[in-house]
Image (cartoon, rainbow, N blue to C red):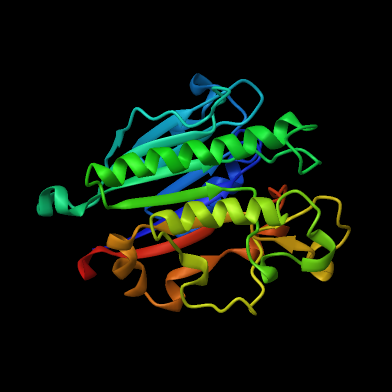
Amino acid sequence: MKISIATWNINSVRLREPTVLRFLEERQPDILCLQEIKCQNDQFPMKNFKALGYEHIEVAGMKAYHGAATISKLPLERLPTSFCPLDHARHVSTRVVADASRGDAGDFELHNFYIPAGGDVADREVNDKFGHKLDFIETMRAYFAERFALGDQHQVLVGDFNIAPHEHDVWSHKQLLKVVSHTPLEVGILEDLRQSHDFTDTARLFRDDDEKLYSWWSYRAKDVMASNRGRRLDHIWVSPALRPAAEATGRDGFTIHTDMRVWEKPSDHVPVVQVLDLGAL
């Protein structure tokens, strides 16, 4: 069984609902994880998503800010998780029932994150927002240490991590070394989280670091694709138990939908998709 998981910082789901619906109709992911939905739970536009077959929807909303939602063709079971030290709506955690015929063997945990951006100064002593970002990632580390200790090995982490870790995940490594999202401190902490449980960053599974990969481009660019000053802030990670499912779909199993950055009324992020072949497990 193959399933496709998409992650997308939509920058207001109500403003860009037509764009999301177009993406679902044209690209047909099985699961779509949205961040920065910027609405409360009862304001989330469920009706049209359900009409397209996405009947399973879990939302963590917040008035005007932040927020995350996971919409799925597959059954979802909400998990009682807490990651944000400030109690902002920045994550949705679910168990995905991917293949009922296989019992629990087809299930996995899916964690949809909107990690804080961190403000403008990479120093928690003078910038509370940066400290919040580091604390959020530390809470993630503690959570997954507990889950793996309990034997929950099938984990998928997706979302806007607000960190571009590799040299060619940003348009200019040298010019952005002191810019929040690519500072050595952030990159190191995110890498420590990834390595702590040997998560695989699926974007780089079949792509060397000399290949430029971006998923975000600033609204300030006059001709965004001509200048191409992007960053790869959006990620999909899989735990070691699920790595064979990502490997089985090959290089084409991972896609960044760059073309959508110039759609009408675009988000500054584009969807990132990973196909998993659960039959390879």
Q: Image quadrant for the C terminus?
A: bottom left
Q: Residue at x 53, y 54 (%)?
A: 23
Q: Is residue 143 visible?
A: yes
Q: Is residue 172 visible?
A: no
Question: Residue 280 placed where, x, y %?
Answer: 23, 70
Q: Is residue 116 left or right of residue 90?
A: right
Q: Image quadrant for the N terminus?
A: bottom left
Which of the 4 image quarters holds residue 200? bottom left
Q: Is residue 79 left or right of residue 9?
A: left
Q: Residue at x 56, y 49 (%)?
A: 8
Question: Residue 120 placed where, x, y %?
Answer: 81, 41
Question: Residue 225 placed where, x, y %?
Answer: 78, 67
Residue 208, above or below 110: below
Question: Residue 193 placed where, x, y %?
Answer: 49, 51
Between residues 223 and 238, which one lies in front from this camera angle? 238
Between residues 61 and 153, which one lies in front from this camera angle? 153
Residue 241, above or below 104: below
